[in-house]
Amino acid sequence: MYEIGLKAYNIFDKAQLFDMYHSWWFIALITLFAINLFLCSIKRIPNALKFYTHPSFDHSNGKMLKKIDCLNSSVETSVEKLNKILSQKFGSPLIKNENGEKCYLFQKGRIGRLGVYITHTSIFIIFIGAIIGSIAGFKGYVSLLEGEKSSTYWDANKKREIPLGFDIKCEKAYVEYYTDIRSRMPKDWRSELSIIKDGKVVKKKTIEVNDPLEYNGIVFYQSSFGEGGVKKLILTIQPRDGRKPFVVELDSQEEVKIDDETKIRLLRFVPDFVISDGEIFSKSEELVNPAAQIEIIKGNERKSQWIFQKYPDFHSTGKGEYNIIFSSVVPKNRTGLQVAKDPGVNVVWLGCVVMLLGLYISFFVPHKRIWVKCTDSSILVTGTTSKNKPSFENEAGLLMDEIERSLKC
């Protein structure tokens, strides 16, 4: 939001651009596309089904492959030899008698005519899976510091925290950088996660990009990383009475003595301090403007004070016994997790498998047909294919050579 501005953020948010796969307009577009695909397919599929219901015996549909004049043998004998060879390659023929002439149709690969419709069907299946996932699924986000756990995730569409039904805990978060200090480009980041149900750890896994953790159909993806929390603060204590300064380490749990009567403890840590309308909050999770609210305890007197790492003189500790300087912070790593549930994903995978099958059939299974038409004194052999005609012509040429050799025997 801070990068694009509040006005642009509101426009993008109303247009559901931050989660477009669950937006109403995305669902409407894929529905319209599905209707368009269905109407186009339903118009053309009857022509493809005719190859099953009304196979054509019109031999003129094919290219002339061979003409056999039966001068020294009967037509029946020649047809018998010819059919034997073609049946081995194409299976049993369909036979039709017309005007006293017999026509044989040998064919294989009829399924190739349906390849495009199988592919279209796969798209429908994928659409159904996408709609199931869009309606019944969700996508959210949760950010955890090391050692922190959460029982909810942030749903950007509903704009509220949604219960998970269990706890997700970040045990450790690791970030490795390339050795070039100037670039500070991350080389790898990963998170040790635990799923806690009814007080017991039921699943543990170290996740990284493209290797998520899944539990009860909810998938946790490694989405981002950073620093934000605090393991301990390094404070420099400067006594105002001229004694030597000394260093103390302050964590979020313990009170630390700085002399026999005075102790300090950490009340609050803000990684990117911002104040607006009197409210203090962190602009980001990064250590851009670290600030800490500490409490100085002396006897029954308690006094809180904000100290800033980058602005040590701002809100100084006044005229007290000590000038407390925020020297540095040992941060905690933070892991950003995308939380997603998509009950339609298996349907999408099914659609992908069907699509691969449909594409294979469409491109690599041609419908080959050979007609054998018998007259009183000759036999005409014609043939055609739905695709890859040069390959079919070579195959048909070899078949005709084999037939010719057989007829000479």
Image (cartoon, rainbow, N blue to C red):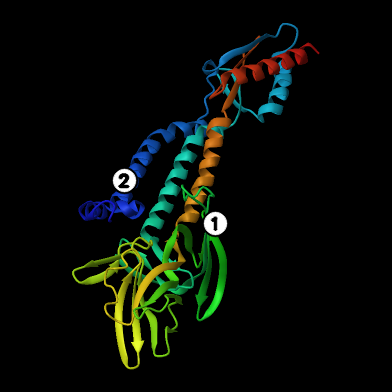
Q: Quadrant of residue 71?
A: top right
Crowding at mark 1 (Cα within 10 Å: few <14, some 14-19, many 20+): few
| Badge 1 amino acid | Asp
Identify the image quadrant of residue 232: bottom left
The front one of 82 and 329 is 329
Work out which residue is located at the far front of the displayed protein and give it.
Answer: 242
Measured along the vertical axis of the image, is residue 116 above or below residue 391?
A: below
Height in image: 196 above or below 76? Answer: below
Q: Which residue is mark 2?
A: 29
- On the question of residue 338 being in view, the answer is no
Which residue sits furthest bottom?
300
Residue 99: x and y in percent read 55, 17
Count up the numbered dots.
2
- The residue located at (53%, 59%) in the rendering is 190
Return the x and y of residue 222 as percentages of the image width and height.
48, 58
Which numbered disc, 2 or 1, marks the residue closer to the eye? 1
Say which quadrant the N terminus sits in.
bottom left
Could you tell which of marks 2 and 1 lies nearer the N-terminus? 2
| Above or below: residue 32 compared with residue 245 | above
Tell which of 302 and 199 is nearer to you. Answer: 302
Q: Secondary structure at mark 1?
A: loop
- Residue at 69% x, 27% y: name it: 89
**Which residue is at 75% across, 7% downward?**
72
Residue nearest the viewer, comparing 394 with 178: 178
58, above or below 134, in the image: above
Query: Can residue 8 be seen?
Result: yes
Disc 2 residue crowd, few under 14, some 14–19, many 20+, Cα 10 Å? few
Closest to the observer, 275 or 6:
275
What residue type is disc 2 on? Answer: Leu
Query: Which quadrant of the figure contains the C terminus?
Result: top right
Q: Residue at x 54, y 41 (%)?
A: 356
Which residue corresponds to mark 1? Answer: 211
